[in-house]
Image (tube, grey):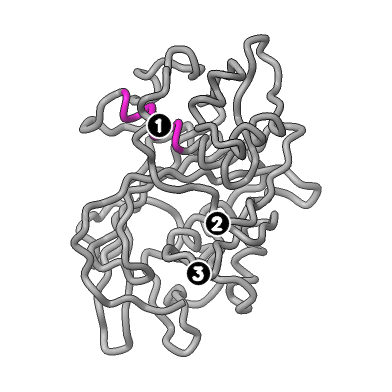
């Protein structure tokens, strides 16, 4: 991964990400997809399903197609400066991106049954928009499947890309009977891994990860089940994580809330409070080595 040292002054792009989880015989696993190598956002890196908020996300008939009132969704995000409809649009964006990128559709029909994902995907391929698909199939999105987890804001010195995003991370269990798979368009490979195994593969140079994924996986590695992750996410409001990069003689360092160099002194998440860019490895690493990801 190449280091970006330029200052980016363009406005933040609103985005949503779903950290999709499952319980495997060996423990908790997370779904990761490899972005297309030619993508201008983290090309070649392994990411969670997600993407930019579309203006149409907030135009959905939310009374008809969401399972919770907007007031509840707004309260869960803990963002007083956005409207209830904007909050609803963030949930819609997360569920839409999860479906478009992985084929997983967290929705129910009018009879409160599962959903025909193949039919919904066929309608998308025919050119129908996501909102139209929901209307034609009389589906209600299951926002209860999503639990707000963190809010990552790209600093003006992004370090690994040339765009800035304000991304809400949600955690969710993949619905029974549905299979997550990459779309062969924006993403070219996908895999289920335990969080620790994903970090081990990153350390071994087998996969590429960006700092938000590194820190998120380190946080997930402290759990043994989907229930544990979801329960912890429900027990607290999602922290805001605005990394603050600085440069030392040795190179670029990113610090997080709780670090002595960060403007926010309260710790936002477990794990190391800073990563540094290892020039020879061309990646970000914790200062005290691999095991410090889990301290």
> What is the x, y in percent for residue 261?
23, 67
Which residues fall within the magenta stretch? 85-93
> What is the x, y in percent for residue 203?
59, 75
The residue that disc 3 covers is 38
In the visual, does 106 lie left or right of 84? right
Q: Residue furthest top?
A: 111
Main SS category, magenta section: helix
Classed neighbour count for the residue bearing mark 2: other residues with Cα under 10 Å, few (<14), some (14–19), many (≥20) = some
**Quarter location, residue 75:** top left
Q: CA distance from mark 3 to mark 2?
A: 9 Å
Would you say residue 92 sits in the magenta stretch? yes
What's the residue at 55%, 62% (across, down)?
35
The disc placed on residue 186 is 2
> What is the x, y in percent for residue 147?
49, 33
Q: CA distance from mark 1 to mark 2?
A: 20 Å
The residue that disc 1 covers is 57
Q: How many marks?
A: 3
Classed neighbour count for the residue bearing mark 1: other residues with Cα under 10 Å, few (<14), some (14–19), many (≥20) = many
> What is the x, y in percent for residue 145?
56, 29
Q: Is residue 196 above or below residue 110?
A: below
Q: Is residue 48 above or below residue 246?
A: above
- Tell me, yes or no, whether the two marked residues, 3 and 1, touch with CB atoms within 8 Å: no
Element assignment for label 2 = loop
Q: Is residue 159 above or below residue 224?
A: below
Q: Is residue 258 visible?
A: no
Among the two numbered marks 3 and 2 on one chain, the one whose residue lies closer to the N terminus: 3
Q: Nearer the viewer, residue 277 or 139?
A: 139
Q: Nearer the viewer, residue 106 or 282?
A: 106
Among the two numbered marks 3 and 1 on one chain, the one whose residue lies closer to the N terminus: 3
Classed neighbour count for the residue bearing mark 3: other residues with Cα under 10 Å, few (<14), some (14–19), many (≥20) = few
Element assignment for label 1 = helix
């Amino acid at each position: 991964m190449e280091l970006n040292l330029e200052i980016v002054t363009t406005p933040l792009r609103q985005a949503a990400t779903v950290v999709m989880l499952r319980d495997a015989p060996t423990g908790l696993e997370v779904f990761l997809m490899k972005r297309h190598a030619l993508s201008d956002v983290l090309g070649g890196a392994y990411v969670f399903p997600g993407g930019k908020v579309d203006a149409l996300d907030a135009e959905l008939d939310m009374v008809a197609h969401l399972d919770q009132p907007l007031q509840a969704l707004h309260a869960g995000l803990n963002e007083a400066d956005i409207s209830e409809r904007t909050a609803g649009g963030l949930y819609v964006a997360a569920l839409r991106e999860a479906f478009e990128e992985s084929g997983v559709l967290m929705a129910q029909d009018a009879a409160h049954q599962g959903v025909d994902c193949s039919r919904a995907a066929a309608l998308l391929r025919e050119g129908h928009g996501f909102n139209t698909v929901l209307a034609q199939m009389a589906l209600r999105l299951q926002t209860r499947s999503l639990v707000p987890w963190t809010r990552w804001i790209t600093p003006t010195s992004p370090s690994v890309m040339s765009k800035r995003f304000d991304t809400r991370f949600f955690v969710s269990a993949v619905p029974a009977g549905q299979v997550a798979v990459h779309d062969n368009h924006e993403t070219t490979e996908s895999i289920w891994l335990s969080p620790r195994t994903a970090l081990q593969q990153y350390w071994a140079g087998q996969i590429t990860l960006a700092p938000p994924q590194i820190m998120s996986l380190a946080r997930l590695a402290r759990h043994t089940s989907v229930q544990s992750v979801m329960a912890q996410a429900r027990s607290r409001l999602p922290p805001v994580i605005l990394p603050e990069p600085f440069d030392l003689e040795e190179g670029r360092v990113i610090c997080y809330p709780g670090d002595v160099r960060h403007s926010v002194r309260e710790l936002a998440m477990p794990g190391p409070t800073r990563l540094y860019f290892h020039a020879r490895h061309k990646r970000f690493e914790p200062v005290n080595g691999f095991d410090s990801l889990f301290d």
